Image: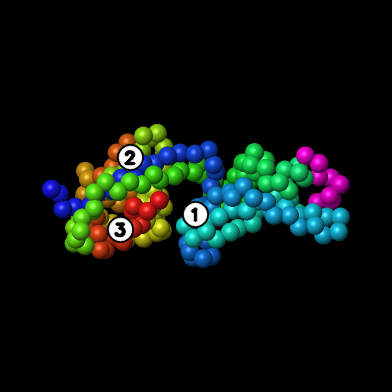
């Protein structure tokens, strides 16, 4: 019986757009996704509206302006109702508008992905190695370092640093790991980490 721990990640795409921007709580660039919730503020006859985003790592909220100090009379009743009721379709529409201007003003907009995690086999020793198998059945064009950063709650710079220190090895790319990290994830990628103790195993397998 193998004494190693094996974990699987499966990358799944979604139509949700995310904004990559600096998170003051994480103190590094993170992915923010829409909560599909609006916040409104009325000041006399003027109205402000924001779409609320959330950091995917720490949960910090960010208010992104939909409009500011607009006369209430100029806001259509349908739009006003959608804002007040947090209409999901309207929120998605506004998120697409925000994404269209985000590259120059707010941060880089990218296609969102999710990780499905499965603990296949766990060892009872902290010195055991850990095999991580990443599946990309939809062949989404997402960089390997981005996936690892998301899954391990680290920055991409930290992922590169750990690779250089030999904390993990990518099967078939042991010699040029840094170059492989920058490429889109293949249909199947095998990664071996030195030990469960160094890895903080829960970050790999928690949903």
Q: Residue at x 84, y 49 (%)?
A: 72
186 versus 20 height, above or below: above
- Residue mark closest to the camera, 1 vs 3: 3
The outermost residue toward the top is 138
Report how far apart the C-alphas of labels 1 and 2 lie in the structure.
Answer: 21 Å
- Left or right: 46 in relation to 113: right
144 versus 203 height, above or below: above
84 versus 25 height, above or below: above
Helix or strand or loop: what does disc 3 sit on? loop
Q: Which residue is mark 3?
A: 201
| Relative depth, front residue between 71 and 42 | 42
Report how far apart the C-alphas of labels 2 and 3 lie in the structure.
Answer: 19 Å
| Residue 23, image x, y percentages | 52, 61
Image marks 2 and 3: residues in contact by CB distance under 8 Å:
no
| Relative depth, front residue between 118 and 95 | 118
Q: Residue at x 41, y 42 (%)?
A: 142
Q: Is residue 171 magenta?
A: no
Q: Earlier in the sequence, mark 1 or mark 3?
A: 1
Q: Which residue is mark 2?
A: 135
As drawn, the label of residue 56 is 1
Image marks 1 and 3: residues in contact by CB distance under 8 Å:
no
Q: Residue at x 60, y 58 (%)?
A: 62
Tell me where the magenta segment starts and ends, as one range: 70-78
């Amino acid at each position: 019986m193998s004494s190693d721990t094996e974990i699987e990640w499966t990358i799944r795409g979604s139509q949700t757009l995310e904004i990559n921007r600096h998170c003051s709580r994480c103190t590094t660039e993170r992915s923010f996704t829409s909560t599909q919730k609006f916040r409104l503020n009325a000041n006399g006859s003027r109205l402000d509206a924001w779409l609320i985003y959330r950091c995917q790592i720490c949960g910090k909220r960010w208010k992104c302006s939909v409009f500011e100090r607009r006369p209430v009379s100029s806001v259509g009743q349908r739009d006003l109702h959608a804002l007040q009721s947090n209409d999901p379709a309207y929120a998605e529409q506004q998120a697409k508008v925000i994404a269209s201007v985000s590259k120059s003003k707010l941060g880089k907009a990218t296609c969102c992905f999710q990780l499905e995690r499965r603990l296949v086999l766990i060892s009872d020793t902290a010195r055991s190695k850990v095999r991580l198998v990443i599946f990309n059945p939809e062949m989404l064009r997402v960089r390997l370092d981005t996936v690892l950063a998301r899954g391990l709650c680290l920055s991409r710079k930290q992922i590169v640093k750990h690779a250089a220190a030999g904390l993990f090895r990518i099967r078939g790319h042991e010699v040029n790991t840094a170059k492989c990290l920058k490429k889109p994830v293949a249909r199947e990628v095998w990664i071996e980490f030195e030990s469960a103790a160094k890895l903080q195993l829960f970050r790999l397998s928690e949903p």
